Amino acid sequence: MSVATDSLVNSSSSDDFAALLDAELDSDSSDGSPDQDCSDDEDNNAEGERTKRCKVLEMDSRVEVQGSNSNGFTEQTIEAITDSCTHPGFLRDMCICCGKRMDDGAGVAFGYIHKDLRLGSDEVSRLRDADVRTLLRNKKLYLVLDLDHTLLNSTRLEDINSEEDYLKSQTDSFEDISKGSLFRLDKMRMMTKLRPYVRTFLQEASNMFEMYIYTMGERAYAIEMAKLLDPGSLYFNSRVISQADCTQRHQKGLDVVLGKDSAVLILDDTEAVWQRHKDNLILMERYHYFSSSCRQFGFNCKSLSELKGDENEADGALATVLGVLKKIHSNFFDAEHGNDFAARDVRQVLKKIRNEVLGDCKIVFSRVFPTKFQAENHHLWKMAEQLGARCAVEVDSTVTHVVSTDAGTEKSRWAVENGKYLVHPKWLEAANYLWSKKPEQEFPVVLSKKRK
């Protein structure tokens, strides 16, 4: 079938690209079962996983470019129709509604749904509005998940050192991926370790969120990691975004996520790649299982694999952040605030909960920032404010904590003499990652070597 005969010229609106996606969105989060013809994996999806990729593939299979017009319409009629078309989407630079070819790369590429798919900005907005309404009705939000150092840690086989060589004999079988956590991918010359608690995390998070994978890695790598994390295709389906899908170099963006920014949360270990969406971000403590990961970030210490240890599942990073996500979800959908969920903004809920962590603290820094550095611009000052603390340059009776790396400074001595808390900057970092004020005595400050 040609584009012309399958276009709006002589087909019902239910055949066009927009209608296909509309129908898909309307059925995705319903209690009915998904389209059985798209994928056998969907039989396992109790919530009716979205089938955008299947729908687009079905549609693409009908697209055959024909060089002649044999459908009985005059060239003037076709030109009038194509001129009035809003061109909501394109496959191989051809409008899926009217068949007009657009050679200027119009729209935003959604290659993770289909390698040739581009959507116009109006269509993206329309789809987001429709999708978020469906999701909010089911009391769900969106969760965008980074891969490396957030959900897992990977290393090249040639980077495994002698202290880690024992791992090669302890890898798990691909016959039952769901029970494993350490995998050797010989085709990619790579070994991957899933972060402790990740399977429980994904299972419980899926009850509250529609989840995306978003990595700066290549697509082939992203797909393999998705298979390890989600062997039953229960959580992500086609929602695996990789480096090639980014619209800005070295940056991740929500412009390629079919969810409204006001309903999206992000988990990532790197703040710098989310310059446009910091208000959506929950920063994760990096997972350094392999020695190559420690070296990559300049840490001169033993990795977890070299120490033959791992994070504790019960109170590790993923268990901690799951608790935070549950709190955010509960606050967002709190019935006390009414039922107009579309008017709410998850970024404001995130900000409010983050501000409660150190909301009763007033902090002064000592010997933490470089000389002549504008204190208010330092990341620790900003971090403290985001956690709800008030920051000051000088001490007074209302100060609760002095943060310092040297117990011998004037402000540090003042804190001790006046019964205030004297803590190391790591106390702030712990509060930021763990979303709670940790016991101050666990972060002591010692005299610098110059003073001893």
Image (cartoon, grey):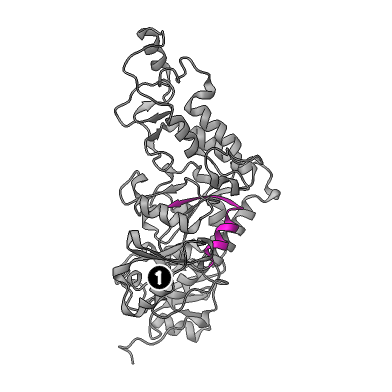
Q: Is residue 436 above or below residue 326?
A: below
Vertical arrangement, residue 55 with respect to residue 297, above or below: above
Residue 320, compared with residue 235, is above or below; it is below
In magenta, the rendered stretch is 197-214
In terms of image quadrants, where is residue 354? bottom right
In this picture, residue 445 sits left or right of residue 161: right
Looking at the figure, which quarter contains the C terminus? bottom left
Question: Which residue is at 49% across, 61% downward?
Answer: 175
The answer, for residue 146, to whether it is visible in the render is no
Q: How many marks?
A: 1
What residue do we see at 43% from left, 82% from top?
Answer: 412
**Residue 363 in picture, x, y percent from top left:** 47, 71
User: What is the quadrant of the N terminus in the image?
Assistant: top left
Q: Provide residue 180's location: percent of width, then percent of height.
A: 50, 66
Given the image, on which type of amino acid does mark 1 rest?
His
Q: Nearer the viewer, residue 117 or 346?
A: 117
| Label 1 packing within 10 angstroms: few (<14), some (14-19), many (20+) | many
Q: Position of residue 10 (x, y in %)?
A: 48, 14
Residue 206, percent across and down?
A: 58, 53
| Residue 206 within the segment the image draws in magenta | yes
Residue, disc 1: 288
- The answer to whether residue 444 is seen in the rendering is yes
Q: Residue furthest bottom?
A: 452
Is residue 57 found inside the magenta-colored segment of the image?
A: no
Q: Nearer the viewer, residue 22 or 286?
A: 22
Q: Secondary structure at mark 1?
A: loop
Image quarter of residue 319: bottom right
Of 261 and 146, which appears nearest the observer? 146
Return the residue found at the far right.
336
